Image: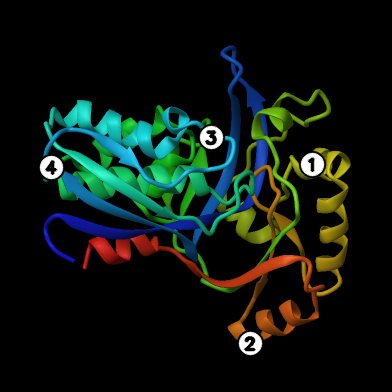
Amino acid sequence: MNNATLSLPAPAKLNLFLHITGRRADGYHTLQTLFQFIDYGDTLHFTLRQDGQIHLHTELPGVAPEDNLIVKAAKQLQAAAKTPLGADITLDKKLPMGGGIGGGSSDAATTLAGLNQLWRSGLNDEQLADIGITLGADVPVFVHGKAAWAEGVGELLTPVELEEPWYLVVIPPCSVSTAEIFSDQRLTRDTLPITLAAFREQGGRNDCLPIVAARYPEICNALILLNNYCEAKMTGTGSCLFGAFPNEREADKVRARLPATLRSFVAKGCNVSPLHQLINK
């Protein structure tokens, strides 16, 4: 690695629960959730350009380059930092699109952090998070890089210390549209707010799960299967499901019992994002 190139992780996140507490006049939903990172994700490679051009060299199916959050994040940072510099960007994509594990948001946050470093822009995490929230509600949690209790539309973050179990994450063969789930008339939007202490004591649920399971039989079937081995949960609006285990061996053991046709992986829970573990060394 030299001063003109940089490779950084864009880790996945899990929502350990998701309560929808209301709906604002602007249509956004208010919620409560708990974010934790896992040590599995995409990788982004950045190379400095002197001509101000932003080039993403990896195509994503169905996403026009100008609509890609990586490109949007780069251009917004460029404007905020008033820099004449540009970048060539390559993405090694591991995280599924429409999986509820934050792939696009994490890619955007890593782009902000990586180019801020490469361009020596000098913006702090608060400033990067302010850019991030315009790209997506989940981007700030990736920018700050700490496991967090989230409220509001997901932008009010309180760092928390959680146990760091091993997770088995299952990827059903479908992509879920968050907008579709949040616009479904059957979605519960009046869950009473709870405290972190209450969650630690009683746990929580994912208010989106009944809607998603009804709309996507692949997710419903995978959930039934995973529930045979652990308490299966869904992250975000899906499609990914997960279960927590005390160690890697137990998680691997259950993974070995799943059908080979069902994509899955095992990863460690992290209270500090792998991105921040690297850039704050």
Left or right? Give the position of 141 relative to 163. Answer: left
Q: Which residue in the protein does label 4 denote?
A: 122
Q: Which residue in the protein does label 2 denote?
A: 249
Tag 1's secondary structure? helix
From the top left corner, tell me how far across and down residue 253 is, in percent. Answer: 72, 85
Between marks 2 and 3 in the image, the one whose residue lies nearer the viewer: 3
Circle number at residue 82: none
Give the residue at x 58% y 22%.
28
Q: Nearer the viewer, residue 85 or 192?
A: 85
In the image, residue 280 above or below residue 256: above
Say which label, 2 or 3, has the lower sequence index.
Answer: 3
Give the residue at x 39% y 60%.
273
In the image, residue 126 above or below residue 241: above
Q: Which residue in the protein does label 3 denote?
A: 63
Q: Are marks 3 and 1 in contact (CB under 8 Å)?
A: no
Left or right? Give the position of 196 relative to 191. Answer: left
Q: Are marks 1 and 4 in contact (CB under 8 Å)?
A: no
Between marks 3 and 1 in the image, the one whose residue lies nearer the viewer: 3
In the image, residue 246 above or below residue 42: below
Dot 3: within a 10 Å radius of its alpha carbon, few (fewer than 14), some, or many (20 or more) residues? few
Q: Nearer the viewer, residue 79 or 164?
A: 79
Dot 2: within a 10 Å radius of its alpha carbon, few (fewer than 14), some, or many (20 or more) residues? few
Amino acid type for the residue under numbered disc 1: Val
